[in-house]
Image (cartoon, rainbow, N blue to C red):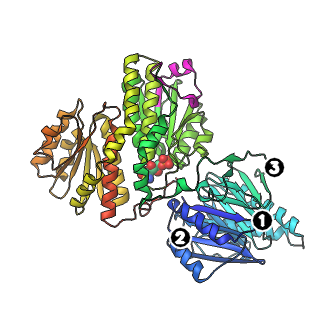
Amino acid sequence: MCGIVGYVGRAHATPILLDGLRRLEYRGYDSAGIAVVDAGELDTRKCAGRIAALAKLVTKEPVSGSLGISHTRWATHGKVNDENAHPHFDASGKLALVHNGVIENYQVLKDELIRNGDTDFRSDTDTEVLAHLIGKLYDDSCASTVDAAAKKSRLFEAVRTALRQVIGTYGIALIHADVPDFMIGARRGSPLVLGVGNGENFLASDVSAIVAYTRDAVYLNDFDVVAASPDKFEISSLAGDITDHPVSKVDFTAEDVGKGDYPHYMLKEIFEQPDTVRDAMRGRLNSDESTAKLGGLNMGPPQLRDVGRIVLTGCGTALHAARVGEYLIERMASIPTEVDYASEFRHRNTPMTPETVVFAISQSGETADTLGALRESRRKGFRTLGICNNVASTIARESDGGVYMHAGPEIGVAATKSFTSQLTILTLLALLFGRMRNLATAEGTRVIEALQALPGQIEEVLGLNDQVKDIASKYASANGFLFFGRQFNFPIALEGALKMKEITYLFAEGHPSAELKHGVIALIRPDLPSIFIAPDDSVFSKNLNNIEQVKARKGPIIAVSSGNCAKHLKGIADEIVMLPEAPDYVMPILAVIPLQLLAYHLAVALGRDVDKPRNLAKSVTVE
Ligand code: AGP
């Protein structure tokens, strides 16, 4: 939610900031802006619209300087217009600030500023209030003439004093015209990373924005405030205590965050799945003992055996992975498993037994609701584990352990490869818990073999791309889609519908197939295709009944099936997409891929902005 990039060094800041913003555009794309200090003057350009609009503006009216901050916005407070675009300024116009998050008490702070005579607010944003507050504190402390070093330390102190008054979340970067080689950042609840360069330093809300310039990074913690100059940086707590932070090496390169030869990130990420699924299980299969090795859980055999109940939580696609996880864990390990929306779990009083373990599933590791659920679970003293892709994320750092996805950066707003990585990891977890209980060696071996076969089978499914593209063009004028599945594939129906809604903007719903007759059947009509995920498994004949019920009411049918089922579907289903044969518990990993491709090709056919669908942002760091 919103992207921040800051630069202090000796190079021309503008191209670095614009390049970083382009890489962060997936975080928000309502408006964008840049502020640069040059020769003691603060200069800014900002506008509603995408980074391309800002770049055009900057080409027409260039700004230069070696100190700058920039922002791409996903609106929370105030309309999408030029005024509300970041950066925002203090009353003097010499301080510029960009912000990701929500300042909940901004009205109280604003009223206080107004009472003290500061009435010159130009936007409706909470961010501008913070800029005014910091600016006022700084100006008051610099009432008498002070030298540059003193100005820096007073600005640093003004930021800390202001942030101590803030209720809410923030990742911020700010600069002041008085100190042209000095940039400040701070975080609470919204990610911020410091990139450490040679004679230059960077701030970014995601390291992918700056990895082209440096792979040395310091991941800030909540309540950290960092002051950076070209050759040094200092991190303090809000109280002013200087703290030490390790510099970490970023484990991916600028190429990894590029599109390669693909027209969209989403398509690239769909096609990466043979590798990402392989990477999710790399080094984690123990064929000798027919089990999985997940050392990151930080749990020995007695603790694993003592787990009596599992809660899986997350949002959106991660929640759909959790729903598959429930079936997997119950099937292989017979541990009662419950799935809850993170946003509900964190505010509910879910009864939990002492032997409960909670898993927070999140690609970004920054989703506010999932983080809230994790914190609530830890507050109550439960072992809380993360399944994250972003290794430096807050969820990864605040959990008691977990399993990384190792899927590489996922830039497309629609989650694809992270979903199949999550499913792979949940299968490993189910196998591990199962083998600590009653899952026989031979069954464990079968699970391992099924997992090992997946990368090759995913390649086969990707080979269906042209068929799926043809189906997409045939149904491009449909009014919406219904998705149905049973057992392991019910959550895949939900996920297929989410992908469809998200990037095509068409109406789409997912249901357990059997729910059809309890109401959904009233929707069936010739312009509303139903997609059945009906592989060759123990519930195929039940699915077939439901397919026939739709056919009888003249609803078009797209069947995603496998094995020997084609002969039963011929003459009933209008389209049949055949998957490789696989056990039912890994079938979701294969079955979701044609649905990802279908949503993708339909979105392209409809002229949608696939990687940046309207109203959405990749990582939702607000509640
Ligand atoms: C998926 O396509 C969506 N963009 C969204 O539902 C996403 O899965 C959700 O916001 C959770 O994100 P996370 O995995 O980063 O926590």
Residue shown at the point (78%, 77%) measured from the top left: 40
Write down the residue under mark 3.
Answer: 242
Residue shown at the point (42%, 46%) measured from the top left: 317
Tell me which label, 2 or 3, sits earlier in the chain.
2
Tell me which label, 3 or 1, sits earlier in the chain.
1
Q: Is residue 61 left or right of residue 440?
A: right
Q: Calculate the distance from the C-alpha at mark 3 to the C-alpha at mark 1.
A: 17 Å
* Residue type, label 1: Phe
Residue shown at the point (78%, 45%) measured from the top left: 244
Secondary element at tag 3: loop
Residue 581 vertical position relative to residue 363 in the rendered view, above or below:
above
Q: Calculate the distance from the C-alpha at mark 2 to the C-alpha at mark 3.
A: 36 Å
Tell me which label, 1 or 2, sits earlier in the chain.
2
Secondary element at tag 2: helix
For the view shown, which residue lies furthest in the bottom direction? Answer: 60
Write down the residue under mark 1.
Answer: 182
* Residue type, label 2: Ile
Disc 1 packing (10 Å; few <14; some 14–19; many ≥20): many
Residue 226 vertical position relative to residue 334 in the rendered view, above or below:
below
* Residue type, label 3: Ile
Write down the residue under mark 2.
Answer: 51
Q: Where does residue 559 sit, x and y in percent of width and height?
A: 21, 45
Q: Calculate the distance from the C-alpha at mark 1 to the C-alpha at mark 2.
A: 25 Å
Magenta stretch holds residue 5 = no
Q: Is residue 83 left or right of residue 156?
A: left
Q: Where does residue 587 sit, x and y in percent of width and height?
A: 32, 36
Quadrant for the N terminus, please.
Answer: bottom right
Q: Which residues are magenta?
A: 288-310
Q: Is residue 41 visible?
A: yes
Secondary element at tag 1: loop
